[in-house]
Amino acid sequence: MAYRVLGRAGPPQPRRARRLLFAFTLSLSCTYLCYSFLCCCDDLGRSRLLGAPRCLRGPSAGGQKLLQKSRPCDPSGPTPSEPSAPSAAAAAVPAPRLSGSNHSGSSKLGTKRLPQALIVGVKKGGTRAVLEFIRVHPDVRALGTEPHFFDRNYGRGLDWYRSLMPRTLESQITLEKTPSYFVTQEAPRRIFNMSRDTKLIVVVRNPVTRAISDYTQTLSKKPDIPTFEGLSFRNRTLGLVDVSWNAIRIGMYVLHLESWLQYFPLAQIHFVSGERLITDPAGEMGRVQDFLGIKRFITDKHFYFNKTKGFPCLKKTESSLLPRCLGKSKGRTHVQIDPEVIDQLREFYRPYNIKFYETVGQDFRWE
């Protein structure tokens, strides 16, 4: 009987060991599958929330893949200079609003900030040239269009204004240009409320030449407008200039400057000569760079004189195969004006010019 019991008990032992081994192996496999699933979900979730590129593991990936610190990604994915569009899940998450700060959101490409410097005027003075020239500097990022925030779009708020700005690094200056600010009564106060440390650039030009240029531009868009002489005078015989015409009023620089000096010290306003910007662009831009507190990167080597247009252009750079000149709307041939009309306007502007020279401590030699 003992033999029969031992004989019957002996054979099942290998099967029981196999069952135990199978159960243990199955348990380990389930644990590994669950762990892999959780890791994949976690990686996928983080890539969706953070905008990271989604990577797929190779079909032969083993358990050692879970211990790697980096994952192979599709080399055709976006580069830092070509940000990809956000996914639907990411787009649904609203960006944080930082109304009380000067920046919004952070990125490897920089942060959108309110501008630290503004080109506020004047129309037809050379503001576009200054903007295009200063954009060559690596420490400056400028908005290419005119946002007209402080005159037309102020009701949209600073968050909207900030959203228009290019991304900048901590070491870079954000800048924008809207020439109509200089003659907008509310602009100085509004800019001061944004930041009392804002640096202001004003490009000025002989007011008579500026008025003719202004009229030439308007005439190209509205050929049926009255003559320059007819718009300039209320009574030409008596020499009564019509200061209500905007082309004339803009050139009364000292009157507009008074509004700015109520909020900003003269040391915070830099005046660029529109005439010297043509004859000595490197010199004028050197002073602009000094005013902004950045190194003199833009020099003579960046310019050449375009005889056709009659003003300097930027030479081709490493990033541009062609030289850069201002558009067709710049450098138009001015309409012919009666010399007597020009003399009358020079006499009209003379006292305003002299007072302007005295106020800013600079003689622009327009007489």
Image (tube, rainbow, N blue to C red):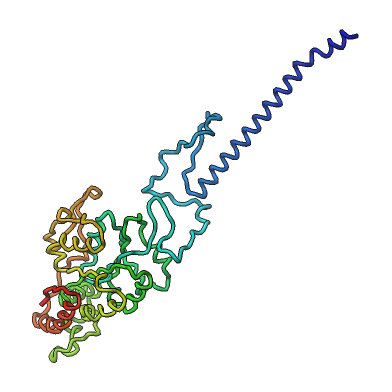
Kindly indicate the quadrant of the structure image that contains residue 99.
bottom left
Is any part of residue 13 visible from this angle?
yes
Q: Which residue: 34% across, 70% down?
A: 196
243 to 175, vertically: above or below: below
Front-lying residue, 227 or 361: 361
77 left or right of 33? left
| Residue 173 percent coordinates (x, y) | 31, 59
Kindly indicate the quadrant of the structure image that contains residue 367.
bottom left
| Residue 239 percent coordinates (x, y) | 14, 89
Kindly indicate the quadrant of the structure image that contains residue 77.
top left
209 to 76, vertically: above or below: below
Q: Which residue: 24% across, 59% down?
A: 134
Which residue is most to the right? 1
Q: Which residue: 19% across, 60% down?
A: 286
Front-lying residue, 140 or 216: 140
| Residue 27 percent coordinates (x, y) | 68, 30
Instruction: Specify the quadrant that holds the N terminus.
Output: top right
Front-lying residue, 150 or 315: 150
* Total numbered labels placed on residues in the image: 0
Front-lying residue, 3 or 59: 3
Is any part of residue 309 visible from this angle?
no
Which residue is most to the bottom? 238
Q: Which residue: 23% across, 74% down?
A: 218
| Residue 124 percent coordinates (x, y) | 21, 71
105 left or right of 140? right
